[in-house]
Image: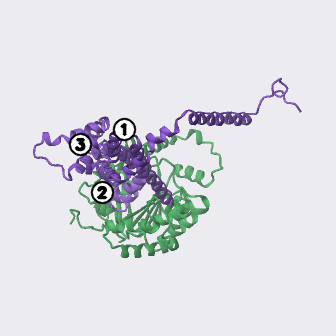
Chain colours: A green, B purple
Amino acid sequence: MTTNPAPTHTTSSDGDAVVVEITDLRKSFGSVEVLTNITTSIKQGEVVCVIGPSGSGKSTLLRCINLLEEPSGGTVLVDGIDVTDPDCDIDRVRSKMGMVFQQFNLFSHLTVLDNCTVAQQVVHKRGKAEAAKIARANLDKVGLAGRTDAFPAQLSGGQQQRVAIARALSMEPELMLFDEPTSALDPELVGEVLAVMRRLASEGMTMIVVTHEMAFAREVADRVIFMDGGVIVEEGHPDRVIGDPQHRRTRTFLKRVLDPTHVDPEIDEDPDGERRSQIKEAELTARAQPHVPDDLKEQRF
Amino acid sequence: MTSPAAAGRVRRLSPRKRAQRIRWVQYAVLVAAVALLIAVADLRQIQKVFFRGDLIVDTLTQGLGRALFNTVIYALGAFVLGLVLGTVLALMRLSSVGPYRWIATVYIEFFRGLPAIIVLLAFGLLPLAFPGLEIPFGIYGTVWSALGIVAAAYMAETIRAGIQAVPKGQVEAARSLGMPAGAATRKIVLPQAFRIVTPPLTNELILVVKDSSLAYIIGLSATSFDLTKYGRDLANTNANLTPLVIAGLCYLLITLPLTFAVRRMEAKSARAR
């Protein structure tokens, strides 16, 4: 059916299966290198929060995992399958990875229920009734069982994001990727989305969460990765990375995030500021233009 | 309490008052023009040329239904063909495969630049170039292909714009769920794109309805007359414009409800935006 090698769970030292293994990952937009030799792995059931300033490449890292961005070098193994390999059936790998976007990206022409069934029917070839049953169960889980017939535009941002989570869960993924899921929400709506994510984590879902919610990261994450300038500066248990950061850049970042009114005398002589704005700019241009990774570009009918 | 402006010899009007006065003058001119027209015009003569009773009856009974039907069928067939072909061309223009893009661009520029009447004539004479060639559905097929091919060139550009107006996040969401590129296009992108371009496509349909009046150029038999040809023949034989007035009203009979229906459809689908 597929040329992929059978999924082989690589096993780490303490026995848990490794779901994602990233080795020497590099990504450039034009001449700007946004990710530099990223190496890390995520075990089954692990909740990893990726934090870092704007322009640290954290979203790009997430998007490289499901190949929304094509890495410029290195490998990304998901369940032992190398997604950077041109022979890999990326659609199959993606169907095992749910992704939640900052801007929700619900299908605006479909009802809440259809948002959660369309991919099941296309990808898993499920019948309408079966797909709807799974979708309803997941909508119930995110607390939106009563809004199945609504259109996305009729929902609040928090509700839309919860539908997006239910949509991803309906594919019954092994891994969930969250790309700043609460950054586009009004402050009073952040809690309902985080609550859903917290519950998901407690149920043992493997999650990679790019976020600015430090309290959430500290409470829920098994591991926090701090990125800056396209590299992993430090990673480890949240109590250590957030509670007792070892690196100067981590400390500066956390100070700014945790106390935004604090005036930082170093702010104007920040040596990394220029690199960050370069990365941010490269990311933005890459995503704004109809640049589509080759995989998305392929013939459309 | 006198303001400096009011202190002048002529009291200045406030801008709002002045705008109001100007509007009254405009109304007065309009009423005067209509009154003059009525006074000058020979209403009986006008009625005799444009609305002659016996000719109205003749026009209505001699085959207007058939002509109306033909016009609708010509336009509908051409529109459907144009829509399908236009969608394919739009996708080709957005393809990453160079030759697809070039072919689509050449096609669009070629047929947008040609008068529809020339394409129609060419299609009418096509059997001369390809002896033995027979366009299916006879005269209907000929009109459909010619007008559809021209309409496709216009619609392709409209549909392309619609596809590009669908946010990129929609494709990314679809692909991240594991949907293949084709399915994402069919299930997610195109439905939204068509919703966006419904108003300009309605416009295109109305243009096709009117362009169907060019069908006469390939030589129609009485049963395949469209509205214009039908009205014009009757007008010529009677040296009277009444049949053309009726034919004109029939076009409005098609296009006005169409505009209305689409407007309602849009309002209904607005909630799905």
Place of residue B168 in the rendered image (x, y in percent of width and height, measured from the top left): 41, 51
As drawn, is A160 to the left or to the right of A81? Answer: right
Q: Which of B31 and B260 is in front in this view?
A: B31
How far separated are the C-alphas under marks 1 and 2?
58 Å
Outermost residue to the top: B9
How far separated are the C-alphas under marks 2 and 3?
43 Å
Callouts 2 and 3 close, C-beta under 8 Å: no
Q: Quadrant of the N terminus of chain A?
A: bottom left
How far separated are the C-alphas under marks 1 and 3?
22 Å
Outermost residue to the right: B1
Residue B219 - label? 3
Point out the tag, 2 or 3, that comes first from the N-terminus. 2
Place of residue B39 in the rendered image (x, y in percent of width and height, measured from the top left): 58, 34
Place of residue B138 in the rendered image (x, y in percent of width and height, measured from the top left): 20, 50
Chain hosting mark 1: B
Q: Name the secondary structure under disc 3.
A: loop
Q: Which amino acid does label 2 sit on?
A: Gly
**Residue denoted by label 1:** B239
Q: Which amino acid does label 3 sit on?
A: Gly
Point out the tag, 1 or 3, that comes first from the N-terminus. 3
Quadrant position of residue B214: top left
Chain hosting mark 3: B
Chain hosting mark 2: B
Measuring 40% from the left and 58% from the top, which residue is drawn there?
Answer: B173
**Residue denoted by label 2:** B182
Crowd tier of the residue under label 3, counting other residues whose Cα lies within 10 Å: few below 14, some 14–19, many 20 or above? few
- Camera-side mark, 1 or 3: 1
Outermost residue to the left: B132
Place of residue B111 in the rendered image (x, y in percent of width and height, measured from the top left): 28, 38
To the question of a shared chain for discs 2 and 3, the answer is yes
